Amino acid sequence: MAPRCSWMWRLPRSPLLGRTLPTTRRLGAGRSLSSKSPTPQICVVGSGPAGFYTAQHLLKHHSEAMVDIYEKLPVPFGLVRFGVAPDHPEVKSYGAEDKKELGIPGEKLPGVYSARDFVGWYNGLPDNRYLSPDLSSETAVILGQGNVALDIARMLLSPLELLEKTDVAQPALEALSQSRVKKVWLVGRRGPLQVAFTIKELREMINLPGTRPIYDPSDFQGLGDILKDLPRPRKRLTELLVKSALEEPGEKEAVRRAQCTREWGLRFFRSPIAVLPSEDGKRASGVRLSVTRLEGSGESAVSVPTGETEDMPCGLIFSSIGYRSVPISPGVPFLPRQGIIPNSMGRVLGAPGLYCSGWVKRGPTGVITTTMTDSFDTAQSLLEDLKSGALNLSNSRPGASAIRELLLLRGVDPVSFSDWEKIDAVETAQGLKVGKPREKILNTEEMLQLVSR
């Protein structure tokens, strides 16, 4: 079997891949273009939401554009397929290529996992299929207080019957069915007014069947007095936090909480300074936290250590402190500290004709709607440059045909859209047998063998 390369999809109008079409015709439109009006040939690298939203805007607003999308995996859609949580298929966020390190002693001990790897594991990302996390500890600590942290907590504590209806990877489902985790702490270095999760995820976590929230009421004292001055999204989120933490639950909710066997809680003003080893030094047994205080107020407040420390016993630790992008080529400018490509409205600085979108453009913030708006802005910058003549199309490059020829010379066979449809059909059929939306194929080689039949 010839070596396979990334997934390739030529847009617009009809989803044809792996075919080199004459550049004198618009794909799927059936009318000739004037030789005096070169067709814009646009390459999008990455088939996640940022890539697709950029392509969508280009095609909607330029009737002659030809767009090719390239993806390193044999399957498209990036973290729409592999990201966040299987029980939230409508809100999966677009991700970045690497995770941030904690940079503290003990970080590499068994029992410590990055949120990115754990999310990839339960979502069936081929690179993470061998993760095999140890879920034998009754207490887990998640370092971070964003949506991904809440997703992980929900996955650890959700009743099995809820997870069985999702497209969670089967090995993850089996491992979670044997999990002994009963308590999850989400630790943040700042306070309730700076949490990064959103109200929808918080509300769902508060009402998770079989699970009750635990709070320290002192963390929320006085917050009700400043609610009126907060921006609306932060105000609604804080109102829910204060109500859940300080108000006595109704009779029905009190009975529900009393019957719960699992719990989760928020710990504020704590920053990790070391992972504590077990007595034999072979695995994590806890995390040492620096007690912090805030300087400043609101979103811009920064945490500073007080000099006090606190040890939190646990055998399972997740680092959910963010993602970062990585450079794709020595020829593409990159700011490693910020994890972004230097750009102005998506135009890569110092590289005319090159654009960026998604987290590599703005950093690892926001959710899918943020990525949509961001991608539309990048596409609009490209369209404006086409209109103004800033992009010279008179010396048009061969585009996708040159990529096809290069792959042919190297003996590499790309995966086409029709190949993806074969994978999709098998996954969907396997999922139907067990009552799931799909049963993801976790092995890249298995995917390639499937499409070559």
Image (cartoon, rainbow, N blue to C red):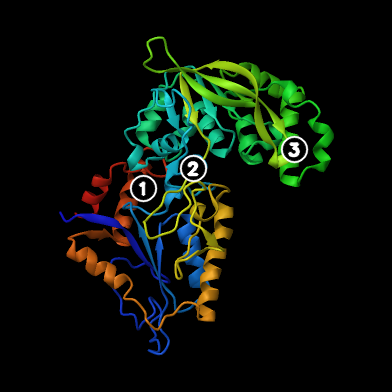
| SS for callout 1 | helix
Distance from the alpha carbon under mark 1 to that under mark 2: 30 Å
Q: Residue at x 76, y 46 (%)?
A: 231
Tell me the quadrant of the picture where the C terminus can be found. bottom left
Q: Nearer the viewer, residue 51 or 287?
A: 287
Q: Badge 2 is on which residue?
A: 323
Given the current orientation, which residue lies at the most extreme left position?
1
Of circles 1 and 3, the one toward us is 3
Q: Nearer the viewer, residue 383 or 53?
A: 383
| SS for callout 2 | strand
Q: Residue at x 40, y 26 (%)?
A: 108
Of circles 1 and 2, the one toward us is 2
The amino acid marked with disc number 1 is: Thr
Of circles 2 and 3, the one toward us is 3
For residue 428, the mark is: 1
Left-right relation of 442 to 338: left
Q: Is residue 274 above or below residue 36?
A: above
Badge 1 vs badge 3, beta-carbon distance below 8 Å: no
